[in-house]
Image: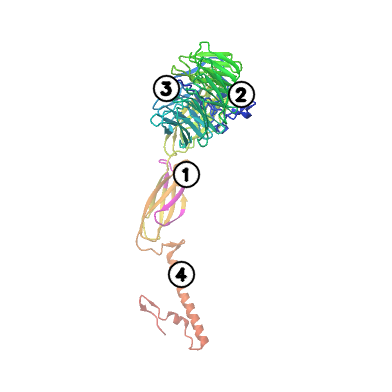
């Protein structure tokens, strides 16, 4: 079974290259633009045939000559097309792995292994890579690490490339004989939950296109080939076009100008009305099948055939504009890609060549020979073209970018918390220093950096302030140097960051045992292990009570503090914490035992001896009694009931202490 595995990447600037009559072209799902994070790729190619409409056209330029930038060998033949986004090239292999390569060097960043072969192109968006496999599973992987975020099992193997559009992820499955059905699904791309699934009674081998609220895909194998249109929101059928031909559709439709363009695996190419499914025009390709997804731009539809012919035809009428036949007659099963910036059409052939044609005239510009048949559809970004081949390799053609080199020095390399190290960065290419480079610093421990300044050509200085740490750590400082026209350079340096020296606090209580309410002198010494530390901030606390006063800094790390013991007998732990800038807090403790009867001569309340309060209380007591008796006498004198008696006598009459009467009537 022939597969046209074609990769399509997403452009942030799709509107730039819409044709003048694009008011009738609703194939570009604007809701999906910018779905992937913006990285170092000029126009990200984020899914099969570039966008959800499967137009296969990017504003980017392609290479002007067949110059190999790099190649990477996988563990199996490569049917699928690359994804180029955020400085990555994502491409799966028949070995069941997805490879994440550096866009500029081809070096492996990470790989992810599934349980079976992969022939479908992944899609990138939301910081994730969406990958379908013949192991019945669709995976969502972290774009930067390759770790799995979610996965969903299906009724049958999945060989169609996922499409992201309008906040949904769409794909179809092959037919399951045991279940008696295939399925087409719409998922939430964030967590893999199913919005809807629709049962299909035949194989879904090709990928889907999304436009104008509809999802379009081909079916066929068990019966005549047909094109199906589903409602994007509900999954219900909008229309089905039966070709009446006993063949299959293994390619994806492309949508533009209100039409759906699709090639059958037999010698028929169709243009259908998107809204109704009615036939607009058709073309019978002589002596060959249609094996590619078409590319559409500027009122022209481009597609290849199994006879090695690429056609450019009027998208509205089907009238031929030009055709190109490969010199070897090798079948074209690689879906063409359009690089609008250079007006180039790229496609691969079974004759092992990648071809570059002038998209307006069909004239051959150049071709590149690989080691195997090229079914993988090209992806274009950053003036380069990326594709796979059946020799198990992935190729990147374009101008080789010269690399930068960078060095990073630091002085000093052993710091304490919040200390500063002076950084010096040199940036060069193969011939000399580079001025005007942009430097980005990072710290594994979270330190901060000043803005770098170039002192002489190619030499830059900056300051690094170490973070505040509680234990010694090795902090890796890294700098990335960027300059236009060069590959980025990185350099790193390890710096040891030690915590502030700890304060040691020694506390002694004099006396250590006292009576309730008494004052205890706390003798405090603060050191950093060897040196006496003055000027520290002291914070005293007690376990269950008491108060503090009279904190005095006596210099040379010696301090005194008054602790007034509580009135309850107990054992109290007094803690004194010491803080000072550039030091780690320390604390010390002393134990004060409170026991016995309060000594009224030493117990103080509000700073005054307690016995004074007692004397004052007794005096007030007698005064109150005298006042009360005087008022009673005055009351009796006014009533005339009896003669007044001496007030003092009455005041003392009956006064007794300890049960004994000391005064009686005179």
On the question of residue 433 being in view, the answer is: no
Q: Which residue, given by chain and number where applicable, does mark 1 sit on?
A: 580
Camera-side residue of 454 and 169: 169
Secondary structure of the residue carrying numbered label 4: helix
**Residue bounds of the magenta highlight:** 525-550
**Which residue is found at the position 51% from the left and 10% from the top?**
328
Could you tell which of marks 4 and 3 lies nearer the N-terminus? 3
Q: Residues within 10 Å of mark 2 (few under 14, many from 20)?
A: some
Q: Earlier in the sequence, mark 2 or mark 4?
A: 2
Foreground residue among 574 and 367:
367
The residue carrying mark 3 is 94
Q: Position of residue 596 (x, y in %)?
A: 34, 62
- Cα gap from disc 2 to disc 3, whole angstroms: 38 Å
- Residue 326's x, y, as percent? 53, 13
Which is closer to the viewer, label 2 or label 4?
2
Looking at the image, which residue sits at the far top? 327
Q: Residue furthest front?
A: 244
Considering the image in quadrants, where does the C terminus appear?
A: bottom left
User: In front of the other: label 2 or label 3?
Assistant: 2
């Amino acid at each position: 079974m022939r597969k046209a595995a074609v990769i399509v990447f997403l452009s942030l600037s799709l509107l730039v290259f819409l044709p003048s009559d694009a008011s009738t072209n609703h194939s570009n799902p604007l809701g999906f633009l910018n779905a992937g994070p913006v990285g170092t790729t000029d126009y990200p190619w984020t899914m099969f045939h570039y966008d959800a409409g499967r137009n296969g056209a990017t504003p980017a330029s392609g290479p002007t000559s067949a110059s190999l930038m790099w190649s990477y060998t996988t563990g199996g033949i490569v049917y699928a097309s690359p994804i180029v986004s955020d400085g990555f090239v994502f491409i799966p292999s028949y070995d069941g792995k997805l490879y994440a390569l550096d866009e500029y060097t081809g070096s492996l960043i990470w790989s992810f292994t599934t349980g079976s072969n992969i022939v479908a192109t992944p899609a990138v968006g939301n910081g994730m890579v969406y990958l379908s496999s013949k192991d019945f599973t669709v995976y969502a992987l972290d774009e930067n690490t390759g770790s799995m975020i979610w996965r969903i099992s299906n009724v049958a193997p999945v060989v169609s490339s996922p499409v992201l559009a309008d906040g949904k992820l769409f794909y179809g499955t092959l037919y399951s004989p045991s279940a008696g059905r295939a399925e087409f699904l719409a998922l939430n791309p964030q967590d893999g939950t199913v919005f809807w699934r629709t049962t299909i009674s035949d194989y879904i081998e090709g990928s889907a296109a999304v436009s104008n609220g509809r999802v379009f895909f081909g079916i066929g194998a068990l019966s005549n080939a047909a094109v199906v249109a589903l409602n994007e929101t509900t999954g219900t059928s909008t229309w089905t076009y039966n070709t009446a031909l006993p063949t299959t559709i293994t390619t994806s439709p492309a949508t533009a100008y209100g039409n759906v363009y699709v090639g059958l695996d037999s010698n028929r190419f169709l243009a259908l009305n998107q809204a109704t499914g009615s036939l607009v025009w058709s073309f019978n390709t002589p002596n060959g099948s249609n094996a590619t997804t078409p590319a559409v731009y500027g009122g022209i539809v481009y597609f290849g055939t199994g006879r090695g012919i690429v056609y450019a035809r009027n998208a509205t009428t089907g009238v031929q504009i030009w055709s190109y036949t490969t010199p070897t007659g090798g079948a074209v099963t690689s879906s063409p890609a359009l690089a609008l910036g250079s007006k180039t059409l790229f496609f691969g052939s079974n004759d092992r060549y990648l071809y570059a044609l002038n998209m307006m005239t069909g004239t051959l510009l150049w071709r590149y020979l690989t080691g195997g048949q090229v079914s993988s559809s090209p992806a274009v970004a950053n003036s380069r073209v990326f594709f796979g081949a059946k020799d198990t390799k992935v190729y990147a053609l374009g101008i080789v970018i010269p690399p930068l080199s960078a060095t990073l020095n630091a002085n000093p390399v052993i710091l304490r918390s919040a200390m500063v190290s002076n950084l010096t960065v040199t940036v060069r290419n193969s011939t000399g220093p580079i001025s005007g480079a942009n430097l980005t610093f990072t710290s594994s421990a979270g330190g901060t950096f000043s803005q770098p300044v170039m002192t002489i050509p190619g030499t830059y200085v900056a300051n690094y302030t170490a973070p505040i740490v509680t234990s010694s750590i090795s902090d890796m400082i890294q700098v990335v140097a960027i300059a236009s026209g060069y590959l980025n350079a990185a350099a790193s340096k390890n710096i040891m960051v030690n915590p502030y020296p700890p304060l040691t606090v020694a506390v002694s209580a004099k006396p250590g045992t006292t009576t309730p309410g008494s004052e205890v002198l706390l003798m405090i010494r603060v050191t950093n292990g060897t040196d006496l530390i003055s000027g520290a901030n002291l914070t005293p606390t007690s376990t269950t009570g008491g108060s503090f006063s009279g904190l005095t800094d006596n210099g040379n790390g010696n301090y005194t503090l008054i602790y007034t013991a509580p009135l309850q007998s107990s054992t109290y732990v007094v803690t004194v914490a010491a803080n000072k800038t550039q030091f780690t807090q320390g604390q010390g403790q002393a134990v004060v035992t409170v026991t016995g009867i309060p000594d009224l001569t030493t117990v103080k309340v509000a700073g005054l001896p307690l016995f004074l309060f007692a004397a004052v209380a007794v005096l007030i007591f007698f005064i109150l009694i005298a006042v009360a008796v005087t008022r009673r006498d005055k009351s009796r004198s006014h009533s005339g009931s009896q003669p007044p008696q001496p007030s003092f006598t009455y005041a003392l009459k009956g006064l007794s202490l300890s049960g004994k009467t000391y005064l009686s009537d005179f």
